[in-house]
Amino acid sequence: MKKKLEVPKFKNEDKEREFWWNLDLSEYFEPDDFVLVSFPNLKPTTKPISIRIPEYLLNRVKEKANELNIPYQALIKQYIQKGVFSSK
């Protein structure tokens, strides 16, 4: 560590944003000062969407979700994720 970083109290977010934008962290830290971290409980940001699917398909998904004892929207997300990440 080169020198101690003093972080002031900010009056508002604009002042804080300006502080971090103009700060050169290389004046305070060496590459060896950083450690690898993970955030296992961090949930990704979600965004609501609207899609149109046939009613029979929605009913089948709801039936399957009921069999698995999970919310049907969670099951739809699982199906989408499986489809996106398994297609290569």
Image: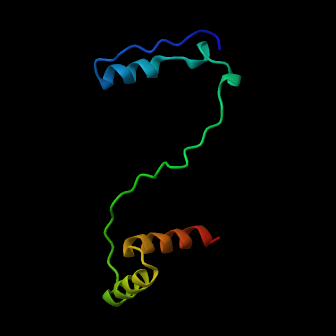
Residue 79 percent location from the top left of the image: 49, 74
Kindly give the residue lying farthest to the top in the view shown: 3
Q: Which residue is drawn at 60% across and 9% down?
A: 3
Residue 83 percent location from the top left of the image: 55, 73
Residue 18 percent location from the top left of the image: 39, 20
Q: Which of 1 and 57 is in front in this view?
A: 1
Image quadrant holding the N terminus, namely top right
Q: Residue at x 34, y 90 (%)?
A: 56
Q: Is residue 45 left or right of residue 49?
A: right
Residue 39 percent location from the top left of the image: 55, 44
Kindly give the residue lying farthest to the right in the view shown: 32
In this rendering, the answer to whether 38 lies above or below 29 is below
Kindly give the residue lying farthest to the bottom in the view shown: 56
Kindly give the residue lying farthest to the left in the view shown: 11
Q: Which residue is drawn at 32% across and 25% down?
A: 13
Image quadrant holding the C terminus, namely bottom right
In this rendering, the answer to whether 8 lies above or below 42 is above
Applied colour scheme:
rainbow
Q: Nearer the viewer, residue 43 or 85?
A: 43
